[in-house]
Image (cartoon, rainbow, N blue to C red):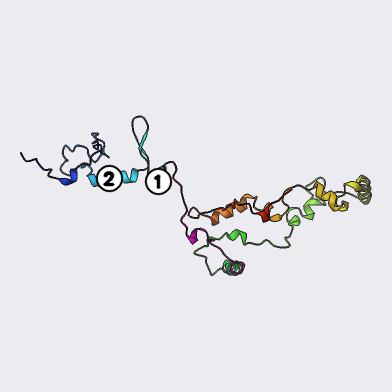
Amino acid sequence: MSKKKNANPKLKRKSGDAPKKKSRSNHSLNPERKVSGKTSGNGPTMRSKSTINRLRMYKNFKPVRDSKGKILKSAPFQGKLKSGTVARVEPHRKWFGNTRVVGQEQLQRFQEEMGKVLHNPFQVVMRQTRAPISLLQEKAKQQRVHVLDTESFEHTFGRKAQRKRAILKATDLEELCEEVVQKSSDYVEDNDRSLMSNQQRALEERTENPTPLFRAGQSARVWSELYKVIDSSDVVIEVLDARDPKQFLLIE
């Protein structure tokens, strides 16, 4: 007798593959559910298979687990690599070059042009730059102290004085002389750091690096400006040289 051939060759299953279990749930997001019959007229109809697949694509953000909680299929972009897999960076020049680098001349030119636009009432800045502009705003060299605006002479001295006593270190010349004599008597020459020798000053100083470059960057303002420049698409790589050449060895 001749064997009966399979009518559909696509349905052939490879040897060793487990048959895919068909879901029997009647959930609205199950594309393989049984369709008893669509309602006629203007009433609601059941979702088609393409609509269900599209909705599942929108909702596909969780891993598929079994009844024991074991992950059968990981969520998108959350799959774990196998043990021993090494992640490597593509050997391309673009990953190791500077991004968004600007020179001092370009910064000065941009600062001048930006100042002209801001002071001109007939011009409007429509598109702002991603550069940290707050770092370019220089403060005035000689800032005026607004003491008279807050405490004028009329409200500090005279009949309209709103305070019982002004903030003065000395009310008369005798009190000022007494304060000078007291400070001169309390002065100890041994504690004056300006008269200390370089050797004594070096012993009292801390052992940290005195370079101002290493002291900078501790404020939250600097870090916030750094985060503005570096976005999520940038790749920041710190390369550490683990070699130990003889020229750089400190033998003590």
Q: Is residue 42 left or right of residue 115?
A: left
Residue at left offset 33%, top offset 33%: 66
Of residues 209 and 47, the one drawn nearer to the viewer in this rendering:
209
Q: Is residue 97 magenta?
A: yes
| Residue 89 % position (x, y) | 47, 53
Residue linked to disc 2:
53
Q: Amino acid under label 2?
A: Asn
| Residue 246 % position (x, y) | 66, 54
Q: Which residues are magenta?
A: 83-109
**Which label number is shown at residue 77?**
1
Picture layout, residue 223 above or below residue 105: above
**Which label number is shown at residue 5?**
none
User: For the view shown, which residue lies furthest in the top direction?
Assistant: 68
Q: Is residue 67 visible?
A: yes
SS at circle 1: loop
Residue at left offset 16%, top offset 44%: 41
Mostly what secondary structure, the magenta segment? loop
User: For the view shown, which residue lies furthest in the front direction?
Assistant: 246
| Residue 211 % position (x, y) | 71, 55
Whether tag 2 and tag 1 are in contact, CB under 8 A, the answer is no
Residue at left offset 83%, top offset 50%: 201
Label 1 Cα neighbours within 10 Å, binned few <14 / some 14-19 / many ≥20: few
Q: Quadrant of residue 36?
A: top left
SS at circle 2: helix
Q: Is residue 65 left or right of residue 35?
A: right
Q: Is residue 119 magenta?
A: no
Picture layout, residue 53 above or below residue 89: above
Who comes first in sequence, dot 2 or dot 1?
Answer: 2
Q: Amino acid under label 1?
A: Phe
